[in-house]
Image (spheres, grey):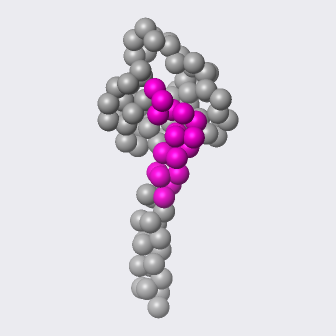
Amino acid sequence: MIKQMGVLAIAATMVALPLSASADEALAKSKACLACHQVQKKVVGPAFKDVAAKYKGDAGAAAMLAGKIKNGTKGTWGPVPMPAQNVTEDEAKKLAAWVLSL
């Protein structure tokens, strides 16, 4: 019985991970992030995979990106500024974590 419960816990975790990532992608869509960004290619702003690659291994990246999402930024990826986004602190953190997970 205990062994079966362990297997179920592992299976539940494996199912929850894609659901969480899917929920964060849905958040990105609902906040219109994909109007200027795509996962795989540059549009107006950089591809999210390029952002993830640039900050891979940077322990402070999630907080820094959440701040840029919430407050806007300019000059990091070229001359086109990213305006401040209408997101809560929690949403900005979720979006930053999702981008860095790609």
- Is residue 40 visible in the rendered image? The answer is yes
The span shown in magenta is 19-36
In this rendering, the answer to whether 85 lies above or below 22 is above
The image position of residue 38, as x and y in percent, is: 39, 33
The structure residue drawn at horizontal position 43% and vertical position 71%, both measured from the top left corner, is 10
Q: Is residue 70 left or right of residue 1?
A: right
The structure residue drawn at horizontal position 52% and vertical position 40%, both measured from the top left corner, is 29
Asked if residue 28 lies in the magenta stretch, the reply is: yes
- Is residue 54 visible in the rendered image? The answer is no
Query: Which quadrant would residue 78 be assigned to in this image?
Result: top left
Quadrant occupied by the C terminus: top left
The one of 48 and 36 positioned closer to us in this rendering: 36
The structure residue drawn at horizontal position 52% and vertical position 47%, both measured from the top left corner, is 26
The structure residue drawn at horizontal position 55% and vertical position 23%, both measured from the top left corner, is 68
The residue most toward the bottom is 1
Magenta portion: prevailing SS class: helix
